[in-house]
Structures are given as structure tokens and as C-alpha cells.
Image: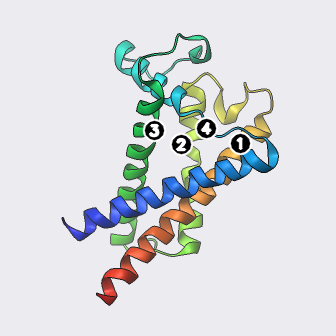
Amino acid sequence: MNQDVLAIFTAGVAACLGMDAWQQILKRFTGIPATNWAMVGRWFTLTLQRRTMYHPTIDNEAPVANELPLGWVVHYLVSMLYAVIYWLLIQASIIQPTLADGFIFGAASVVVPWFYFMPCMGKGVMGKLTPNPMKACLVSLSSHLVYGTAMGVGFMLFESFFSSV
């Protein structure tokens, strides 16, 4: 397997695992629920079926077959896409595989849930239609900061491992 593809895969998985662990920590210590990946699976299925990404009543839609495992698959595939973007930014010498650049990448990546996924799932821009928009934004931001940092660490560890082999 090409080392670049392996690096992208490794960093993408590391970032997802970091985000998932962070959300479990938040859940345990604050009671804030982790992302419901079944809803992501439902959103993805409805998007394919209805040919629209906007599903403002998704919470009231009937569950779809295998929505939870599908949501997890979508979560990890999206992470691979983010990892490709991070890798391209490394190749362009815009960022490096570091904690700091990963943190910055995570901060920048939060625009996707704030301005795309939340509105597509009927939550409004920056979660303005949720019961607590500030909380929704802060949870998303913290998750993406951890995610980006883990992405940077994933690339950093991969690079250090293969440079020493």
C-alpha cells in the first residue's frame, strides 16, 4: 500500500478515535450526549433517496434500516476526506503534522457542522434552532479541536514511525 494512503488512513482513524473518546469523556463527566451516528446514517440514506441534503424534520422521520452502522461508516469516511485535505495542505507546505497545526485545522473544520450539517439536519446555522445554540456550538467546536489535534498527531506519529524505519 502506498505510504501516503496509509498515512491518510492512519491519521483519519486516529482523528475519529480521538473525537469519539472525547465525546465519551464529555458524556461521562457532563452528561452531554455523544453524537448520535444513527441520525447521520438516516440523513445519508434520506439524502440518497430524496436527492436533497436538507432534512429539517429528520428527528421525526422513521428510522431507516441499518442507520447506526451506516452512520459510523459515514463518520469514518468523512474523516478520511478530512485526512486527504490535511495531507494536501501538508504537501503544499501550508501546515505541518504537529499538535498546533492539527488544533488549527480542527478549529477551521468546525465550519462544516456549523454551516452545513446542522442546517441540513434542521438545527439551523450554528445550531440556532436547538434548545441551547451556544452549547451546540461549543460541543461541536471542542469535538473538532480534539479531532484536528488527533489528526495532527496521527500524521506526526506516522511520519516519525516511517522516518525511523
The residue that mark 1 highlights is 137
Secondary element under disc 2, as helix, strand or loop, is helix
**Image quadrant for the C terminus?**
bottom left
Q: Earlier in the sequence, mark 2 or mark 3?
A: 3
Q: Please give left or right for residue 98 compared with residue 50 in the image.
A: right
Q: Please give left or right for residue 51 compared with residue 27 in the image.
A: left
Q: Amino acid at mark 4?
A: Thr
Tell me how far mark 2 sits from mark 3, CA to CA. Answer: 18 Å
Tell me how far mark 4 sits from mark 2, CA to CA. Answer: 15 Å
Q: Amino acid at mark 1?
A: Cys
The numbered disc on residue 35 is: 4
Q: Position of residue 117 (x, y in %)?
A: 54, 33
Q: Is residue 30 visible?
A: yes
Up-down relation of residue 111 to residue 125 (above or below): below
Tell us which disc is closer to us: 2 or 3. 3
Q: Determine whether label 3 and label 1 are within 8 Å by CB.
A: no
Q: Amino acid at mark 2?
A: Val
Density class for disc 1 (Cα within 10 Å; few <14, some 14-19, many ≥20) is: some
Q: Earlier in the sequence, mark 1 or mark 2?
A: 2
Q: Amino acid at mark 3?
A: Trp
**Residue 66 appears in which quarter of the rendering?**
top left
Q: Determine whether label 2 and label 3 are within 8 Å by CB.
A: no
The numbered disc on residue 72 is: 3
Q: Earlier in the sequence, mark 4 or mark 1?
A: 4
Q: Toward the viewer: 122 or 19?
A: 19
Q: Position of residue 33 (x, y in %)?
A: 70, 38
The residue that mark 2 highlights is 112
Tell me how far mark 4 sits from mark 1, CA to CA. Answer: 13 Å
Density class for disc 2 (Cα within 10 Å; few <14, some 14-19, many ≥20) is: few
Secondary element under disc 4, as helix, strand or loop, is loop
